[in-house]
Image (cartoon, coloured by chain):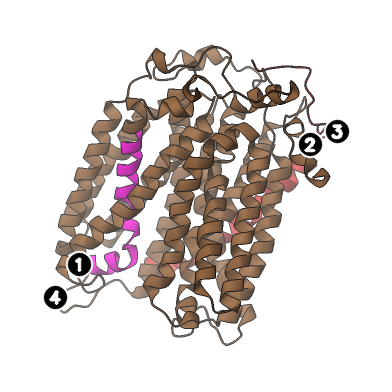
Chain colours: A red, B brown
Amino acid sequence: MTGNEDLPRSQDTGGSQTPRLVASWLIVGVPLAYGIYQTISRTLPLFGG
Amino acid sequence: MAALTFLDREHTVAGPGFSRWLIPPAALAVHLCIGQAYATSVYKNALVAHFDTSLTAIGVIFSIAIVMLGVSAAVMGTWVDRVGPRKAMFAAACFWATGFLVGALGIGTDQLWLVYLGYGFIGGIGLGIGYISPVSTLIKWFPDRPGLATGMAIMGFGGGALIASPLSSQLLAFYDTAFDPSDPTTVASGDAVMKLFLTLAVIYFLVMMLGVFNVRVPAPGWKPPGFDPAKITAKPMITAANVSANNAVKTRQFWLLWTVLFCNVTAGIGILEQASPMIQDFFRDGDGVSAVAAAAGAGFVGLLSIFNMAGRFVWSSTSDYIGRKPMYAIYLGVGIVLYFLLATFGNTATALFVLLAAIIISFYGGGFATVPAYLRDLFGTYQVGAIHGRLLTAWSAAGVAGPLIINGFLDAQGTPGELVAADYRLALYTMVGVLAVGFVANLLITPVPERFHESEGHTDAFLEARDAESRGEKATTGRGSR
């Protein structure tokens, strides 16, 4: 049996989550953008760049 | 330990109003870090020089890590489903960072076996647990778009190498000023690689902790606004039932899907394994000179990495609309045609060669990212993480079979980098056959028979364990575990 609604849940949803969402996506998005930029730079010789 | 109470199950269930869009970056935080495993070539030569050994002996470090990925994902999958994503991600971060630390100790003390133990064995366990840790959670948060959700996370594994490769080069140049990453004749010192390992241990641990702190499982009964589960389960090939991991491996469907993944990965590795010399060989004239320079060959490898990553997100998301079985029919069926065209006409124009190879590799990546959603469709959400872990043994097997096939054929022709297009044909036509086997296996996949289904109560291994814990009982794990 699952789904006991009386069991405790984390208290983490007070207030706006927007700053947390932005920060979380930036922490993973910025390094990923850096990696993609570096890799695309490396592919330029393939296209005569 | 009181300091680790944040890992308890009670802190892992989301409160009301929690945004599910916090879960993909949590998953990405883990996958972007463990994706470093595909960027080991940056310091391979430095380790060969430091330990004064062969490239093969250094390659063993990576091989151990990949084998441990498969083994730990298969063995620890049930544990991951039971304890939840937070504890699993924390364990993955500890293993992954410890792997780097022990590896650094091995480099610092000139003990290669410590690098095997550290990066290979301990780090490999982190790879396996980390790879599967967010999958079932994403599927539960995105029941309306499971392909999109798992595509985002598994895209991170491909993206991790894109980040780690230039970052490691720059860090090596920072720690060893005599090393120039743009000059292939220079090699970084062992001391620089040791410091790189220490730095990566700290960076990866901190980034993975972002995942640990952000990840939550949805509360019982939660569903996205406007989502009607009946609409999803009304589609063919999507079950409303649940199958335990122990029962899943007894089904024909599991082994057919294992074959599908094995064939798709084997064919992709056929290109990835020899990408740089392959493009040069395809455009080599009678004088032995290639129209494609070595720098362009390296650029080709980079381009494939981007398509590998993009395919994980794009194709997996597409599978939410067209269905998982048709998606794999495209990966494998269109893959057959593309592979045949590559082998037969690939040497007529560089642009054609690059285009065909890029699409094939996007299918390779897509195959990895779509498989968790396919498993959800067939076996339900109950122990989908554990079933995924067991299915990943197909990846380990393909990691052995793919290079064996391609290198076996090419070794008989000569040395890659000195061959011509015709020398690749037999190997590539063999891969067409491998894809055909996978295509047939996919066609044979049907819904799982009812006798393997769990009873009504078994729908979520994590919540079941949490409920049992709150009652002071030991969690049961379903019909298949008795």
What residue is pinned by disc 2? A17
Q: Nearer the viewer, residue B91 or B152?
A: B91
Q: How far apart are marks 4 and 3 (CA)?
A: 70 Å
Q: Does the magenta stretch include residue B270?
A: yes
Residues at discs 3 and 2 in contact (Cβ within 8 Å): yes
| Left/right of residue B327 with respect to residue B173 in the rendered view | left
What are the residue bounds of the magenta stretch?
A: B257-282
Which residue is the site of mark 4? Answer: B286
Q: Tell me where residue B257 sits by quadrant.
A: top left
The residue that label 3 is drawn on is A15
For numbered disc 2, what is the local secondary structure? loop
Going by the numbered disc 3, the residue's amino acid type is Gly
**Labels 2 and 1 in the same subunit:** no
Q: Label 2: how many residues lie within 10 Å, few (<14), some (14-19) or many (20+)?
A: some
Residue under pointer 1: B411
Q: Which residue is drawn at 63% across and 25% down?
A: B475
Instruction: Tell me if residue B170 can be seen.
Output: no
Q: Between label 4 and label 3, give the one nearer the viewer.
A: 3
- Residue at image coords 30%, 68%: B277
Element under disc 3: loop
